[in-house]
Image (cartoon, helix red, strand yellow):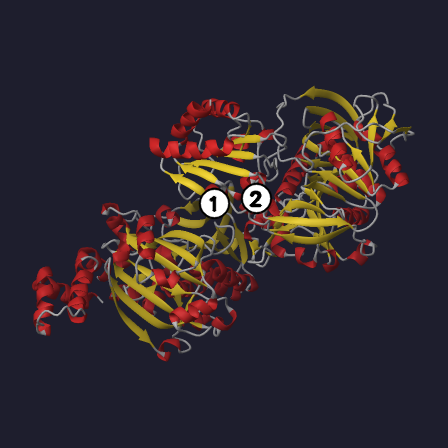
Amino acid sequence: MRIIVLAETQKALTELCAGASQISAQVEAVIIGDRLKPAADTIWHIPAQENALLEDYTETIAALIKQEQPGLVIVEPTKRYKLIAGRIAALLGTSVITDILELGEDLAAERMVYGGAALRTEKAASGCTIAMAGSGLWKAGTATETAVREEKTVQFIEPGIRVKRIAREEKESMAVDLPGARVVVGVGRGIAEQKDLEMIRQLARAVNGEIGCTRPIAEAEKWMPKETYLGVSGLMIAPEIYIAIGISGQIQHTVGINRSKLVIAVNKEKNAPIFKQSDYGIVGDLYKVVPALLKHFG
Amino acid sequence: MKIITCFKVVPEEQDIAIKADGELSFDRAKPTISAYDLNGVEAGAQLLEECGGELIALSAGAGSIDSPKLKKNILSRGPGSLAMVADDRLQGLDTHQTAEVLKAAIEKIGEYDLILCGEGSSDLYAQQVGPQLGQLLNIPAINAISKITAADGKIVVQRTLENEVETLEITLPALVTVTTDINLPRIATMNHILAAGKKPSTVWALEDIGIPEPPRTIEVIDTRAPRQVERKQDIVEGDTDDAIQEFISKLSAVLAK
Amino acid sequence: MPDERFDVIVVGAGIAGTVAACLLGREGLQVLLIERGNYPGSKNMTGGRIYSHSLEKIMPGFAKEAPVERKITREKVFMMTEKSSMGLDFQSSLLGMPGSDSYSVLRGVFDQWLAEKAEEAGVEIVTGICVDKLIMRDGKVGGVIAGTDQLEARVTILADGVNSLLAQQAGLRQEFKPSHVAVGVKELIELPAELIQERFQCNETEGTACMFAGFPSGGRTGGGFLYTNKESVSLGVVCTLSDLIKGPKTVPQLMEDFKAHPAVAPLIKGGRLVEYSGHLVPEGGWEMMPRLIGGGVLVAGDAAGFCVNLGYAVRGMDFAVASGECAARAVIEAGQGGDYSESDLQIYKAYLEESFVLQDMKLYRKFPHFLETTPRIFSDYPGLLEGIMAELFVMDGQPSRTLLKTMMKHADKVGLLKIAGDAWKGARSI
């Protein structure tokens, strides 16, 4: 089966190509310009256009897919590509399956629906499957770089529809890779003040982990960036170890972490739902437990 | 400005029950307006206040969306009128089908300047209908919009992406999908609710908008509650020094990798 | 914004409000029913059970159509201590006769059905809106104010529940005393219908109502209750606020202990909690009744304090229906040639006095005070009964005593005179 990979960041390109190569011997990546290093069997190279936004390549990519008819198109789940993939699907008369957590051999894809209450399995009714990977679909393992066998140039097609960018501002983004982390420490409403997060950061460092949080911490309190919110409509992660500190364990959060291999929880409420979803835990005041953990593991 | 704001009718999420076999039951889940679409409706209402014109609410779905309560609900939030394609053949549409139906309805409505959508629906959150619809209508379509300013024959928008915020100028007619950051949807007041009952609404079947049932592009194989991972639930109660030590020793065994 | 004026605005789509609105709608008046909750019933709570007589009168055969739960054909009343429960069990087809029967109900479902009836009668219903103030003009109520919106009406019916702030605003009611209200909490516990039928020995359409006194309210004024619904059981405790303040146990603790009691636990075993609710209940009876009539305004339902709790029976909804009906009739009558002044609306009181509403409120006027001033009912008497029962039924091999000696031994602990006095006072207040 031929797989075409669409990605705008190097990390995703490398990961998705590596993941795809586990299920196919024919992995092809679309690369625009030369900003990204190729990592697939075949490269479809679209020459970079001056002053073009990524969206301006939509018609070109769509024509390529229509022409090459791959079995699967796997797309990096960025906002730009959500738009581009959707437009491509419209041009090809199909729909994109977004935020997929698992992809079966028969290209049936699994994703979360109804706010995390259910898993839906769906597949393309016919033709090519266009799927957007959810965070952590094909884990960054030891991605062996594939030797590029072929490189082909794609004719750029002038976009019929264009928008004008008049300004651009870099956003401070968290250089953190939560979906790829082996250990993640999550922090929730049990934390009373923003400065107490420092203790949690120390704990994360002590266990070689990254920090994530629950929605109230990110959205209501704004103590941590939105990108670190774990849960439905946030990040879905499956680390080896997840440590939940001061998190009650509402389903909106736990659907984001319950595929972790091991879940450990600290909460002062005996009946907190998180304990039913944990392998190990302690019913105690985190302000007592965390310093003790730091003393031992730090 | 003539604005069409699209909304989806979804089941009330907290009332979706999970049956013993993991299947979902929607029996108690009443139809409601998808929360993220309310941001689109509010954006339309605010643009209307700013530059005058017309705001039409549009939805497509099964026959049951043609409900007096739902219509009153949407009309109490700013739109001056409502159009609906309510047809039982439109159950569980995939995003391409939805876009096809909305496109036909919009063509029936006629000329427009701007189409507003939520970023995704609160139930399935594919975030695809906006992009698909824009492409089918052959107009500029942009997602992730957190601010809209109207100008002559165009709009200037702020688009918030992962690592950057871009300001775009888009000539009308165009389609944008808005995020929850763009506004706080107004709460309808008593008079708005009362006035809603008097606003015009049109309900169409597929024949009225001149298209056949659009073919399915996605096959849904299964929708069920995720299997609960069996957890050890080895919980130490209490935070005495001894209890904490017990907890730590359990963790050490496990974390020592 | 509409400058229409409604004939009637009814505040509160509970039972009294919705019934009043429905009857007025049927008469062809322009009625607006305003509900603060997202849907009628969302803010309402009952134990509970509705005695059907008053609703049957206005909507004959309603029970066949309305989403009622089970017809109650078995009544149980218990005195409870920590270890024991002693009860009366009345099971009879006499309980299920049309026109005088009663049904367990769930308000969220039932009130919505009732509201649909009102809509069918042409009533306009607005939900999710809280009326903050009344429009007052020279001491007469001219409509309502919600947020920045004002709406005029020729007459306003206040059916906004036990803590009617609007009745206070209209000068019809004082702030009530803690002894006038109780706090009730309820758990809705899901159980399969067959299990309910097995445990309570009834068929698919019938069920049981149980009242408990003593232990459930921690030995203080109040009680516990259990009603069987189709696929769930309503279980809860009620405790008068003035007593609750004095007591050591919190309401959640009272609830936990009640659920764990050996007479209760087996009935709900294996059940799943699906809903937890709490509400204030009017307990003061006649003493807490506000003025019911003002210029352009009437008060009905819980807002008027129309609740009677006799320990073995709790009545609120049937009073609400009847007072809603009386209010509607009064509005229709007063509208003919009058302008809804306070004197025009006096007919409301006359209708209430004609019906069981004011007659029963008057009859039982001493009962709340009797309960309040006789804490022995909840503390000593259950213990007294327990003692006597134990003597009767426990055979420990010791030489027996006469029945009279047995009873006197326990009665003396409480005090014979006190018991006699309580019995006398009690009998006269009920």
Q: Name the quadrant of the N terminus of chain A.
A: top right
Q: Residue at x 52, y 23 (%)?
A: A205
Q: Amino acid at mark 1?
A: Lys
Q: Is residue B175 visible?
A: no
Neighbor class of circle 2 (other Cα within 10 Å; few <14, some 14-19, many 20+) is some
Assign a secondary structure to mark 1: helix
The amino acid beneath tag 2 is Ala
| Residue that label 2 marks | B188
Left or right placement of residue B89 versus residue C370 in this view: right
Nearer to me, A294 or B46: A294
Compute the Cα span from label 1 to label 2.
40 Å
**Where residue B40 sits: x, y (%)?**
67, 39
Q: Chain of mark 2?
A: B
In the picture shown, does residue A230 fall above or below C201? Answer: above
Q: Which residue position holds label 1?
A: A276
- Residue B255 horizontal side relative to residue C202, left or right: right
Residue mark closest to the camera, 1 vs 2? 1
For residue A151, what is the image quadrant? Answer: top right
- In the displayed structure, would residue C32 be above or below residue C198? above
Q: Position of residue B235 (x, y in %)?
A: 42, 41
For numbered disc 2, what is the local secondary structure? loop
In the picture, the disc for residue C299 is none
Same chain for the residues under marks 1 and 2 in the image:
no
